[in-house]
Image: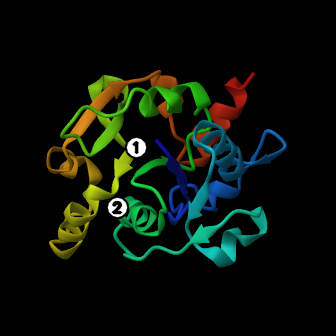
Amino acid sequence: MRRSGFVLAGGASSRMGRDKALLAYRETTLVEYVARTVREAVGSVALIGDPDRYHHIGRAVYRDKLAGCGPMGGIYTALRVSPTDWNLVVACDMPRMSVWVLRQLIYPEAKPGRNCVMAVGPGGEPEPLCAVYHRRCLPVLLLANRNKRFKMRDLVPELKVELRPVDPAALANVNTPDEWAEFEKNEP
């Protein structure tokens, strides 16, 4: 079954104080590192974010079709522009993400009746920014937008999610300069 890959890079990075997607990481940028990981896992990758900001990366970049509603708008956009039914969506701020973790979400296929396979993070929390979404999720996301329900975790029951535990370290994200400094200090 074909799948498409997307990296969400549309956030304001307000807690970081600068665009965290463009932080230098492993001889590239954080967003490009995550994009390479997603591409290796599914065979394709595009970015969801500001084309003016990320065009130089050399990947397709799509502007949010539902601006101002956080990651939910980015996931909606990915599902709208995708040529495939199933779509891997990962946030750009997960520097420990790996192909192995992403393939745990992709294979085996979702159980019948499920529209999403979502990673389970630390403490058993679903991680909507590391998940495989079917286009059947579009109506739920559009209705949530109309009702100004932007938190993806609140939509988990409506999305008919299958939860899969993965290495919690891969889901760690960086949001502040202190978190980034701590991450870099512990990076091998």
**Residue 92 image position (x, y, % from top left):** 57, 50
Q: Are marks 2 and 1 in contact (CB under 8 Å)?
A: no
Amino acid type of the residue tagged 1 in the rendering: Val
Image height of 111 relative to 25, above or below = above
Residue of label 2: 72
Q: Residue at x 53, y 54 (%)?
A: 6
- Identify the element where label 2 is drawn: helix
Residue of label 1: 132
Amino acid type of the residue tagged 2 in the rendering: Met
Q: Residues within 10 Å of mark 1 (few under 14, many from 20)?
A: many
Foreground residue among 144 and 84:
84
Q: Residue furthest front?
A: 1
Which label sits in the foreground, 2 or 1?
1
Foreground residue among 7 and 68:
7
- Identify the element where label 1 is drawn: strand
Q: Residue at x 58, y 33 (%)?
A: 97
Q: Residue at x 51, y 24 (%)?
A: 169
Q: How many marks?
A: 2
**Residue 37 image position (x, y, % from top left):** 65, 39
First-in-chain label (2 vs 1)? 2
Horizontal arrangement in the rendering, residue 104 relative to residue 22 (left or right): left
Horizontal arrangement in the rendering, residue 163 relative to residue 95 (left or right): left
Image height of 45 relative to 48, above or below = above
Distance of label 2 from label 1 (alpha carbons): 14 Å
